[in-house]
Image: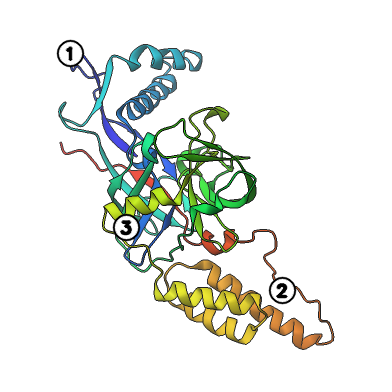
Amino acid sequence: MFNGYLRDGRTGALLNPTPVTFQRRCSGFVVDPAGHVLTNGQCVAPDEPVARERALYTLGRILVAGKKLTSGELDGWVRSRTAGTRFTGKEPDRPPSSQVFVQLNQATGGLTGTPAIAGEVVRTRAADAGDLALVRVARPDLPAVELGDAAALTPGGVVAVAGYHTVDADFRDATYTLRSKTMQVTATDTGQGPVPLFRIADDIGIYSHGGVALDPAGRVVGVLTNDRSGAGGANRAVVPVTAARELLAEAGVTPALGDADRLYRRGLDAYFTGRDDTAVSQLDAVARGGNGNELAEAYRQSAADRQQLTAAAPEQSNLPTVLFSGLGGALLAALAIGVVLLARRRSRR
């Protein structure tokens, strides 16, 4: 959430005597043991016109709830005030306040306490330069993903995409879970700025911006963002991982896997090659490490179940190698996707 004041752009007079708070939610992924998270730039640091419009809609909905405005008048009310309004901090020359919180695995809207983790924005790229942001959270050794090669993004190629969504009607306290889907890369686009983008065939939800496009090995080859050229604003554009690497280099961050990440991948290798004793041992060690990797326990249990099935029916050679069928490479990176929430930092009175 962002917290600030709407003012008349000419006189500085307040449109509302109390601050206006609005929320933005997106997906993101951890890239190193130090807790650096890559996400969507417009989510954590929206351009001033975007923030101003969101704040006006928030105030407008408050007026609708107070019967000072009808829902049918809301869009017109916002349009009539957009050009002549500013969204500022408590002082007219200060920006609105904000604070970032990250949740792993399943997330709850508006949560700022445990298990949400506080963070800070380190660096951003504008919407026409990749629309990315680097956030550092106040907890190290979170499960990280591996960055791959953008060469996997070619029209006609196939990637797995992963990001957050919800089916709840009220986004403010909704439950957000991971959605993943395999889809085709349909085109390239150079019309949204100097960073060439790729388009994919479908959108997996409005909160998926900042999520990932993955190659068959589960490595990140791109970051999902809003397709501003059309598609109704859907998140069907993919920023190539080269832009993400450039942002990390600018911030002096080297993407890397932690010890638990490498052990997890060795456990997965053992699992997918049928070495269940090794898989159980290695995945159990990761699950007990407490770094938030919920998939390690899921795969450990699956390997243990398969051991029991094999012992009970050794003559059956066609036991399933993968009990999590259908998600493919997305499972490898799903553990490191986090919903990034912006939470209010109370203004000083």
Q: Quadrant of the C terminus?
A: top left
The residue drawn where x is 75% and y is 73% is 320
Please, what secondary structure does the residue beneath circle 1 have?
A: loop
Q: Write down the residue under mark 2.
A: 321
The residue drawn where x is 26% and y is 54% is 251
Labels 3 and 1 touching (C-beta < 8 A): no
195 relative to 170 in the view: left or right:
left
Q: Mark 1 or mark 3, which is nearer the start of the sequence?
A: 1
284 relative to 86 in the view: left or right:
right
Three-letter amino acid code at the position of disc 1: Thr
Q: Residues within 10 Å of mark 1 (few under 14, many from 20)?
A: few
Q: For marks 3 and 1, give the CA distance.
A: 39 Å
Three-letter amino acid code at the position of disc 3: Val
Q: Write down the residue under mark 1.
A: 11
**Residue in the foreground of this view, choosing between 130 and 112:** 130
Q: Write down the residue under mark 3.
A: 137
Of discs 2 and 3, which sits in the foreground?
2
Labels 1 and 2 touching (C-beta < 8 A): no
Is residue 290 in view from this perspective? yes
Three-letter amino acid code at the position of disc 2: Thr
The residue drawn where x is 42% and y is 51% is 242
The percent coordinates of residue 243 (x first, y second) are 39, 48
The residue drawn where x is 28% and y is 14% is 84
170 relative to 141 in the view: left or right:
right
Of discs 1 and 2, which sits in the foreground?
2
